[in-house]
Amino acid sequence: MISTVLVANRGEIACRVFRTCRELGIRTVAVHSDADEHALHARMADTTVRLPGATPQETYLRGELIVKAAVAAGADAVHPGYGFLSENADFARAVEAAGLVWIGPPPEAIEAMASKTRAKQLMGITPLEHVTENDLPVLVKAAAGGGGRGMRVVRQLADLKAELTAAQAEATSAFGDGEVFVEPYVEGGRHVEVQILADTHGTVWSLGTRDCSLQRRHQKVIEESPAPGLPDQLADELGELAVRAARAVAYEGAGTVEFLISPDNKAHFLEMNTRLQVEHPVTEAVFGIDLVALQLRIAEGDPLESAPPHPRGHAIEARLYAEDPATDWTPQTGTLHCLALPNGVRLDTGYTDGDEIGVHYDPMLAKVVAHASTRAEALRKLAGALEQATIHGPITNRALLVNSLRHKEFTTAHMDTGFYDRHLPELTQQAPDPHAPLAAALADTHGRSRFGGGWRNVPSQPQLKRYTMAGEEHEVHYRHTRDGLTADGVRVIHADAGLVVLEVDGVRRKFEVARYGDGDQVYVNATTLTALPRFPDPAAQLAPGSLLAPMPGTVVRVAEDLAVGAQVTAGEPLLWLEAMKMEHKITAPATGTLTALHAELGQQVQVASLLAVVQPT
């Protein structure tokens, strides 16, 4: 039997595997980069091994270092998690060659299916080799890995070469494999997948369907099981195809077969992921199982039951990201001061209060999962939990998730993979509480004074505080009187540094207020504000046309022949930054002349760093 497991991964999935191992009495080993030295997964494990460096290429993609770490720590098995080396057949062989148990499918099955090009050939599908205008739109896709990295939709033939280059660079960075291919892009399709589980005795389970259509940059955001609105015949067909694919490669362990369902309900095979998926908790909730525990049992040679448990109810998962969807999904960094959700939902995370969100890895903070007897109940439960969650730290996609879960197109199960292309502006709109700035001001006043400010017998000017909220500036005026605090007709019932109670039109409302250290951020219930100085800082203004880094990252590409003096057009890509395993284009803000270029290939830049200046014509 397995006694000690090393997880060749980080963050949320490493923590999730460790939880099951702990329940089963299995000891755990974590590997960590220098950037992850104090990460939650490193703190959870019984033993840790350092991987020198910070980037994935230096650390979590170094198979030889991970095998060496497993042997040194006395592990007898390796779980790959997802991403990184989870679908790398050579890594699986190296684990087995070291005398360790590989908690995953046979290397031959990984080899057959982990490359999307070989998987399609196995299923009788040929990628496009010579793209013409008649083939458009097409999808450029990385042959290895997943998570939407190395994927580009091409709608104009003239863009194909550049998108192939970008996809190859991103795939190389994320997976260490730059192979890409081109396939037809199905407009208005739904992304539906089937979870399979196979033992070493010939039993293969098909564990229902999952809908993963809500995606940004081809990376899933909200997933659910079962896929709603599928005809029973189509759902059965998908299950049969998934089992057939597993048997074709003598599959063992957990895997997922993915399909694109066209508007006319025809199934198009996409790929088989030879690993555990990020969205596996929704299947666990519906079937009442622990997929990691079953992975371990299969690796130990135990048989599965002849049939899986009967599914019950509906489960939905939302991925909480440190990113700003309203600004091209820009990833965010900083301190996660607090992350807490109401009881009744499942929270899978790799972070705890006080942890730093860095630039080297995926910006997912957590997965939140709700299970209920019906889809409508699960939707309401998950949206309510996210709305009530305490999330203090970098900007997140919380508002997007709540608005998505309540959007009519989603609640009626008429969504497809173009959902965010159509609805992003309305989904990122926030309706911040108009009384949040007043609550922040009153809490700040009481937090700085034992007596909450001083009342004087001589009338004085109102107190003034300024905040930005949802991109807009707000001024707050309040006054101390012998009857207490008054503010713009709002009655102040209670105010201290952490709680303010206001009465508006006879209705009393509570505002929980938090502020950390000397930072300018103030958190009032679910609203984030930035305190502004009373008098603006007369700092020097940047030159018109200045291009600032929207986030910390690495300059991974510079436009060909770009140099000072070059003529550029508005919207033209000039630079590419990589942060949190995603590439972000920096484009010319106007048509004009490039008068300064401060960014260099490979340079590490901080947020708001001056990259270039374009003098408008």
Image: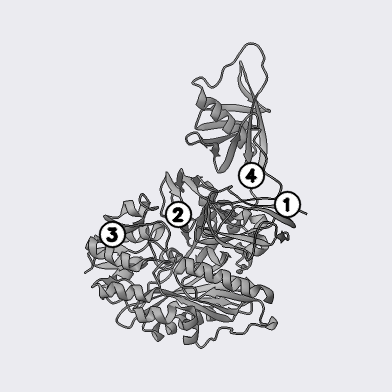
Secondary structure under badge 1? strand
Relative placement, left or right, of 183 versus 45 is right
Q: CA distance from mark 1 to mark 3?
A: 54 Å
Relative placement, left or right, of 110 versus 591 is left
Say whether marks 3 and 2 touch (CB < 8 Å).
no
Secondary structure under badge 3? strand
Q: CA distance from mark 3 to mark 2?
A: 28 Å
Task: Please tell me which of labels 4 and 3 falls first in the chain.
Answer: 3
Q: CA distance from mark 1 to mark 2?
A: 52 Å
Relative placement, left or right, of 229 versus 301 is right
Residue drawn 48% across the image and 60% down it: 372
Q: Can you tell which of label 3 and label 2 is closer to the viewer?
A: 3
Task: Please tell me which of labels 3 and 2 falls first in the chain.
Answer: 3
Task: Please tell me which of labels 1 and 3 falls first in the chain.
Answer: 3
Q: Toward which corner of the image does residue 110 lie, by quadrant? A: bottom left
Which numbered dot is residue 615? 1
Q: CA distance from mark 4 to mark 2?
A: 28 Å
Which amino acid is tagged 2?
Answer: Val
Residue wearing tag 3 = 29
